[in-house]
Amino acid sequence: MVKELYLIRHGQAEEQSANTKDVERQLTSKGYQDASKIGLYLKRNEFIPDIILHSSAVRTTETVWRINEQLGVDQDHIESLEDIYEASVRILIRIITEIPAELRSAIVVGHNPAISYLSEYITGAEIGHVGTGGIVHIRVPFTSWSEISEKNCDFIEYISPEDIY
């Protein structure tokens, strides 16, 4: 069975300040709006994931909450993972390949540069910089997530929040 994967970069976050750790940065109002747009886009396309995995950073958590206001995914199917924060491509591949084979769809919400690099690595497509709130839709042509590797998945599309109406 073909699997659907959406790699999403968190919404726009407040600037780093001396008083705030990077992991504690919150979404800006634009970041909240863009996360809502992502949720609307996924709902309009009738995409309800079997699992949502996200970084433990505040901005990714807030992005997921806002997306899920539209999707209504059960909280038992949403998981915060510290490994996604500051992850390399290798770590993100490990996380994705450990998704149980019976799940057919997933969203991973993380950070750049890893989201951009992973998107290109597993599809071989030239996607470039995934902006804040950017969505990369990937089709995984395997029955198991564990088969994901370099250039063996299909790039479907890249959507920025500005493309969503």
Image (cartoon, grey):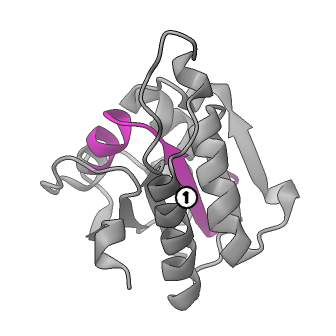
Please tell me in which quadrant of the rendered image residue 96 appears: top right
Label 1: state its secondary structure: helix
Q: Is residue 54 magenta?
A: no
- Residue 81: x %, y % from top left: 68, 33
Which residue is drawn at the image coordinates 47% and 51% (left, top)?
11
Residue 101 is inside the magenta segment: yes
Most distant residue in the left direction: 126
Which percent across, then down, holds residue 104?
Answer: 62, 70
Classify 94 as above or below 45: above
Q: Quadrant of residue 143?
A: bottom right
The residue depicted at 29 percent of the width and 66 percent of the height is 154
**Quadrant of the image containing the N terminus:** bottom right
* Relative to 50, 12 lies left or right: left
Please name the residue that numbered disc 1 is placed on. 32
Give the amino acid at mark 1. Tyr
* Residue 144, horizontal then vertical, whole percent: 56, 58
137 with respect to 152 (left or right): right
Q: Quadrant of residue 23?
A: top right
Q: Which residues are magenta?
A: 98-119
